[in-house]
Amino acid sequence: MGGAVSAGEDNDDLVDNLKEAYYIRSDLVERAFRAIDRADYYLDEYRDNAYKDLAWRHGNIHLSAPCIYSEVMEALDLHPGLSFLNLGSGTGYLSTMIEYIDIFVN
């Protein structure tokens, strides 16, 4: 999955594209995606792919496509104080965005 949204030049472009395609629908999820730069979860030599709506795998490092993460986050009833366990969390990108909501969003 993924690839439904055009590639962006930076994290804000990625978020704008996800919003335009209606993957990101809430302000809460948008704020988390804007606060956590997806490129920070890539190896340096692969960062040029960070803002594409594609899954990425290198050895045992894996990131799902941004549209998948946005669908998951929109489907959850996310709010501050929520307990969340992400089994098989990979790089921690999704967990970090959800933690952002818990700590920084009121």
Image (tube, rainbow, N blue to C red):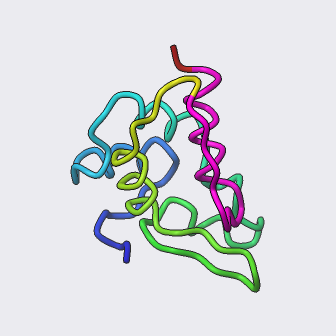
Q: Residue at x 58, y 52 (%)?
A: 94
Give left or right: position of 47 versus 5: right
Q: Residue at x 45, y 34 (%)?
A: 78
Residue 105 against residue 77 in the figure, above or below: above
- Residue at the farthest top position: 106
Residue 47, image quadrant = bottom right
**Residue 21 location in percent, x, y?**
22, 54
**Residue 10 location in percent, x, y?**
52, 49
Residue 37, image quadrant = top right
Judging depth in this view, the residue of 76 and 54 nearest the camera is: 76
**Residue 8 location in percent, x, y?**
42, 56
Q: Residue at x 71, y 62 (%)?
A: 91
Q: Residue at x 76, y 67 (%)?
A: 43
Magenta stretch contains residue 84: yes
- Residue at the farthest bottom position: 59
Judging depth in this view, the residue of 47 and 42 nearest the camera is: 42
**Residue 42 location in percent, x, y?**
70, 64
Q: Which residues are magenta?
A: 82-104
Residue 1 against residue 59 in the figure, above or below: above
Give left or right: position of 100 versus 76: right
The quarter of the picture where the N terminus appears is bottom left
Total count of labels? 0
Give left or right: position of 47 versus 101: right
Magenta stretch contains residue 78: no
Residue 73 against residue 55 in the figure, above or below: above
